[in-house]
């Protein structure tokens, strides 16, 4: 199978949009390079009293529209180019939904599945100790990502406040509610994605009551399974996958029971009345809606021609390569790109920052209403760009986001 460098993919997407916008060379160069990179090691005391060294990264890609915003992931296969790509995509994601933020991303090369809770806490605190002066609600605001969670953010926020000797709850988002987290954050990424699917069904006439499948059954995938019927009023989940395998049942999988099974066993495999299938088979099922919610480069030039879904809503970051985008566009597959489809998470993270900054918190209904308004507006803004530029949805979304960031760079006098 062909391998893909995620950052090269991200830069290719930027260059395509930049050409459509007729951006000058200096602006293009600025938008294809991170403004600040931290590449460092963590020295962590393990449970057996040995010290282990972990490679870590934090990339603050662009500050033109506001402080950097983006998750921190703990993953054994993390690379600097993956983090660069994710930070780059965060810039356009915050711009597409018109948030006053830039983009960033971080990561630690470790395998959380073999680490104790104390070791994970030590890694989390050491990470913050290494870059604390560069964090802050007016500088860089991290959040959870792959294999990190609200508890990770709680440890990190506590370490930051200890170092700085002040309270600053807004410096990390997706925290537990007891220490400054917001209502509505747990399902925000999935909720935002399903809202965009709802709008796509209205615009293009897709049928939300038909079959759907989810690739990746972490937090976003699980919430999408639960919210699909609630928001769209129908639909039958027939296949899901996680890192250990994929399962299928043509008669449907009960989302609530499946989530319970996943949380209890750690995987979707061996769920009752399901049969195993391959990850490739899941992606190529004849479904109305497909949610890629795993890692990068799942849909490529090698399998895009076999995709049968009518709508692809990307809850993962970078699941489709540029070559695959063109193939899907030619097949009339409607792709809701990651910088729009997964933007619900950063939108509610922004809401959390706002609430933290003035110490007054909204109820869940208000969070959902404001998220719905933001994502609905963003979806239709991208639709206008699709019609105006006559391009596929990802390129249209990139045009919207990059135009906003480029304008901010120009107004600041950077270019």
Image (tube, grey):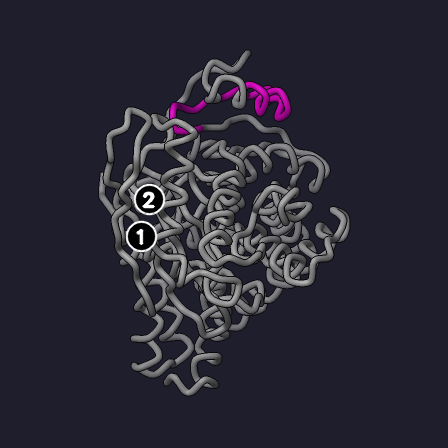
Question: What is the quadrant of residue 178 in the picture?
Answer: top right
Residue under the image location 55 percent in, 26 percent down: 238
Q: Circle 1 sits in a helix, a strand or a loop, which is it?
A: strand
Q: Is residue 251 magenta?
A: yes
Indicate which disc residue 57 carries: 1
Q: Which residues are magenta?
A: 242-261
Relative to residue 350, is residue 314 drawn left or right? left
Residue under the image location 65 percent in, 56 percent down: 203
Q: Position of residue 121 (x, y in %)?
A: 42, 37
Q: Which residue is mark 2?
A: 108
Q: Categorize mark 2 by other alpha carbons within 10 Å: few (<14), some (14-19), many (20+).
A: many
The earlier-in-sequence mark between 2 and 1 is: 1
Q: Between residues 295 and 379, which one lies in front from this camera angle? A: 295
Indicate which disc residue 207 carries: none
Disc 2, disc 1: CB below 8 Å?
A: yes
Is 399 above or below relative to 323? below
Q: Quadrant of the C terminus?
A: bottom left
């Amino acid at each position: 199978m062909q391998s893909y460098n995620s950052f090269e993919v991200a830069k290719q997407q930027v260059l395509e949009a930049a050409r459509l916008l007729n951006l000058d060379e200096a602006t293009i160069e600025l938008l294809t390079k991170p403004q600040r990179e931290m590449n460092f090691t963590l020295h962590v005391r393990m449970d057996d009293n040995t010290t282990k060294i972990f490679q870590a990264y934090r990339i603050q890609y662009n500050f033109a529209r506001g402080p950097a915003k983006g998750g921190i992931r703990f993953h054994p296969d993390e690379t600097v180019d993956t983090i660069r790509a994710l930070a780059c995509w965060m810039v356009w994601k915050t711009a597409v939904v018109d948030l006053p933020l830039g983009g960033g991303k971080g990561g630690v090369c470790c395998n959380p599945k073999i680490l104790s809770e104390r070791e994970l806490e030590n890694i989390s605190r050491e990470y913050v100790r290494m870059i604390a002066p560069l964090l802050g609600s007016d500088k860089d605001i991290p959040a959870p990502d792959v294999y990190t969670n609200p508890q990770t953010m709680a440890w990190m926020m506590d370490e930051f406040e200890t170092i700085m000797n002040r309270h600053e709850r807004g410096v990390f988002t997706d925290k537990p509610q007891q220490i400054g987290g917001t209502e509505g954050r747990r399902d925000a990424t999935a909720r935002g994605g399903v809202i965009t699917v709802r709008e796509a069904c209205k615009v293009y006439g897709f049928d939300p009551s038909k079959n759907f499948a989810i690739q990746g059954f972490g937090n976003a995938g699980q919430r999408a399974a639960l919210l699909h019927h609630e928001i769209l009023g129908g639909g039958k989940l027939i296949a899901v996958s996680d890192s250990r395998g994929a399962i299928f049942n043509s008669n449907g999988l009960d989302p609530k029971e499946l989530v319970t099974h996943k949380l209890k066993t750690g995987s979707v495999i061996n769920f009752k009345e399901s049969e195993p299938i391959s990850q490739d088979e899941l992606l190529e099922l004849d479904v109305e809606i497909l949610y890629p919610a795993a890692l990068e480069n799942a849909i490529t030039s090698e399998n895009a021609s076999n995709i049968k879904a009518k709508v692809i809503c990307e809850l993962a970051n970078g699941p489709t390569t540029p070559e695959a985008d063109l193939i899907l566009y030619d097949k009339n597959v409607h792709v809701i790109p990651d910088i729009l489809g997964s933007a619900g998470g950063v939108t509610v993270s922004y809401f959390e920052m706002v609430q933290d900054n003035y110490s007054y918190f909204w109820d869940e209904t208000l969070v959902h209403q404001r998220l719905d308004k933001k994502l609905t507006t963003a979806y239709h803004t991208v639709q206008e760009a699709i019609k105006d530029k006559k391009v596929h949805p990802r390129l249209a979304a990139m045009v919207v986001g990059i135009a906003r960031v480029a304008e901010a760079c120009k107004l600041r006098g950077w270019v």
